[in-house]
Amino acid sequence: MLKRFISYYKPHKKLFILDMLASLLVSLIGVVYPIVTRTMLNNFIPNKKYNLIIIFGIVLLALYFVKMLLNYFIQYYGHMMGVRMQAQMRSDMFNHLEKLPYSFYDNHETGKIMSRMTNDLMDISELAHHGPENLIISTITILVSFIYLSTINIWLTLIVFTCVPLLLIISSKLRKQMRAAFKRSRESIATINASLEGSISGIRVTKAFDNAEKEKEKFEEGNEDFVAARRDSYNAMGKFHAGNTFVTDIFNVVVLIAGGLFLYSSNMNFEFADYSAFVVSIGLFISPVMTIINFTEQFQNGVTGFERFIEIMDAEPEKDAEGAEELGKADGHIELKDVVCSYDNEKEVLRGVSLDIRKGETFALVGPSGGGKTTICHLIPHFYNISSGQILIDGKDITTLTASSIRRNIGIVQQDIYLFNASIRDNILYGKLDATDDEIIAAAKRANIHDYIMTLPDGYDTQIGERGVRLSGGQKQRLSIARVFLKNPPILILDEATSALDNTTEILIRQALDELCRGRTTLVVAHRLSTIKNADEIAVVDGGKIVEQGTHEELMEKDGVYADLYKLQFRANAAM
């Protein structure tokens, strides 16, 4: 893990070296004051060298001015280095998230992912800047202080430094507890973010069902867990700081007692000026020790954040098979041969499904919810891997093709439409990023949405809000259809694309879909069986199997599952 963390310093090597040099110079300038103090007490003041007192004072003031400039450099450029590293990690994480399979998002909430990309990376940024500075420079300062204090009195210095092992023992005992507590704290923050993201996204549903109290209850559960987690982390941190501060306070007591004894011992060759200088100089040692102690919380936050960052980065991305080929422009012949599929090695969702969808054919999937229809739609674009069997496009096994080339040939229109918080133009343009305005308008016309767009004050530049909140369900659907028109794929998947619409809106969208399907291989998942009566082939999917297959007329003659479903819907519609 350390090697991976250090790799993010490489693009900023020059800035890192300058930051460390500036920090080192600040530490060395800090040594000057006690040296000057000792010199004045031992030499300048007793010998009345007033000119040297003034000169040394001016030199010290000049050094402090330089120290001020160096501190500015450390604070500004050091933090900017951390921010740039954070930005690179964020880019790496986003790029990796784009490569992860559907299954990853089935098991990870959006809010928790966002927490890792924001809060965790912020802590890593602080660690990237302060970590080397605090650890390396403080270590050097401790060594320099040891050498300098030894020149004053080696025995007193050794006595003071015997407190260090006690400090290390206390630190190592409490650090493990502190690290676990801070990790739990990070997880609780991610839980709150996930809850908040879900509650805000679903605010309209909450208001519609008047369930604000329920959402508050759910949020407070996470909030209370956060408080408990922070309580544990601060409890651990409190013990850590209290224990270590107590040890550092012992240093002053040791210096006071041992120094006083040495001062009145004629054999120690220890003058009052040396004693005064040692008392002043002991801060050289205590200061970096306290810096490391105070840095521990930040270190724990940063390490925990980087661990969570690594968890995301180590998630297995989608990978094409070695030597995978480009599909090119597909004809649209799709075959499923004895396909078995299960999610996360659990219960099989599909059990031996075989289908032959010919080029240009409209093939419908019907059946009860949970039967496996949507799973089939997800397998053809290779969103998930199958357990066994084969899926072929134009006679080529999709596992031997690049996922990108497969998906370029497939257009998908779903019931649950996702639109970006952007303009109408940008949302249609998502189907073909290099399309011209004329192509966008032509796609909108074919989707029966152009006339509506032209009634808007900003036309195609109209902002539609988060998830298209300013549009009706039918308008969202037609925008998604326009997007697929622009993409112009040879294969089309319609996953219950009209099931949530009223009859009038459905007629408009049905016209657009009929136009969209013309000349394409089309797989339709339908809830309303009346909409797929004219399909070339209909398959009934139930319990992960194909239980019936044929045309509408053939299936009605069989008087089986499909006929029962159709008659049930017909009676329900007649009763309305």
Image (spheres, rainbow, N blue to C red):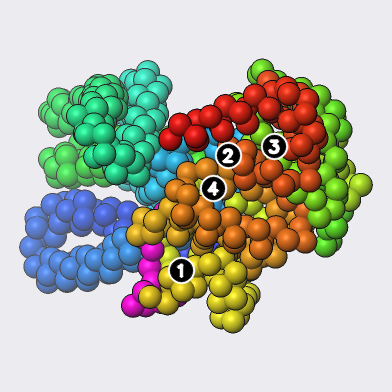
280 on left or right of 206? left
| Badge 1 element | helix
Q: At which x and y percent is residue 471?
A: 38, 59
Q: Which residues are magenta?
A: 456-467
Marks 3 and 1, how far apart in space?
31 Å
Q: Is residue 438 above or below residue 547?
A: below
Pointer 4 residue: 498
Residue at figure coordinates x 77%, y 61% from the top left: 519
Kindly indicate the quadrant of the structure image that contains residue 39: bottom left
Q: What whole-number distance in Å separates the C-alpha atoms at marks 2 and 4?
A: 9 Å
Q: Nearer the viewer, residue 571 or 517?
A: 571
Q: Name the one closer to the observer, 542 or 87.
A: 542
Residue 41 visible: yes
Question: Which residue, given by chain and number where applicable, does mark 2 sit on?
Answer: 528
Residue found 53% across the figure and 29% down from its top: 571
Which residue corresponds to mark 1?
A: 424
Residue 467, numbered label:
none
Task: Report if residue 465 lies within the magenta region.
Answer: yes
